[in-house]
Image: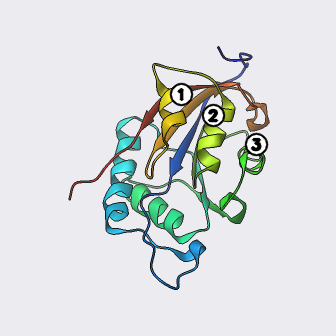
Amino acid sequence: MIARAGAGPLRHLVVLRHAKSAWPDGVADHERPLAPRGRRDAPAAGRALAEADLLPDLAVCSTALRARQTWELASGQWGTPPPVRFAAQVYAADVPELRDVVQAVPAGVDTLLLVGHNPGLEELVLDLAGDGLDDALEEVRLKFPTSAIAVLAWRGTDWRDLTPGTALLTGVTVPRGKK
């Protein structure tokens, strides 16, 4: 069960792991681009968010090239993308660092999209989710692959209210583009 039910509006944290990246020789990890499969999957992730009515009010995205490209291709599926903040601290972040990024979001944001990397994103989802619908928690525990989307729902007046165990993991999906 959720550790504590919050008061305030229903909010969503949408966690998107970057799409499949390439491993070109001599390219620093931070500058690795998307692979062809990633270029197909990232727009599919954007369409999946639109179809689920989970378009964000704000996106926070890692500065790594593969994350920025995922954001650009996913948000390109929407009429008007929301504001985006490119945050260096999301790259290679652990759970406390990611929680700090999320908790710094302005109170007026109801749906936040966080685009980043594993293992941090997977661990963040498991940290924040006090419970999950169906087998969503088990899915994340088993694997949170590239292009995976996890949706956490919670109530609170401020993003600082989102603490370990206070959210409900309402769904996990892994959109794939067609070859």
Q: Nearer the viewer, mark 3 or mark 2?
A: 2
The answer to whether marks 1 and 3 mark residues whose Cβ atoms lie closer than 8 Å is: no
> Which residue occupies 58% across, 68% down?
64
Task: Identify the residue under disc 1.
Answer: 137
In the foreground, 30 or 167: 30
The answer to whether marks 2 and 1 mark residues whose Cβ atoms lie closer than 8 Å is: yes
Tag 1: Cα neighbours inside 10 Å, few (<14), some, or many (≥20)?
A: many
If the image is split into quadrants, where does the C terminus sit?
bottom left
> Which residue occupies 73% across, 19% down?
6
Tag 3: Cα neighbours inside 10 Å, few (<14), some, or many (≥20)?
A: some
Q: Amino acid at mark 2?
A: Leu
Residue 44, horizontal then vertical, whole percent: 33, 51
Q: Amino acid at mark 3?
A: Gln
> Which residue occupies 31% across, 49% down?
176
Task: Identify the residue under disc 2.
Answer: 126
Please tell me whether mark 3 sits on a helix, a strand or a loop: helix
Please tell me whether mark 1 sits on a helix, a strand or a loop: helix
Q: Amino acid at mark 1?
A: Leu
Task: Identify the residue under disc 3.
Answer: 103
In the foreground, 153 or 76: 153
Tag 2: Cα neighbours inside 10 Å, few (<14), some, or many (≥20)?
A: many
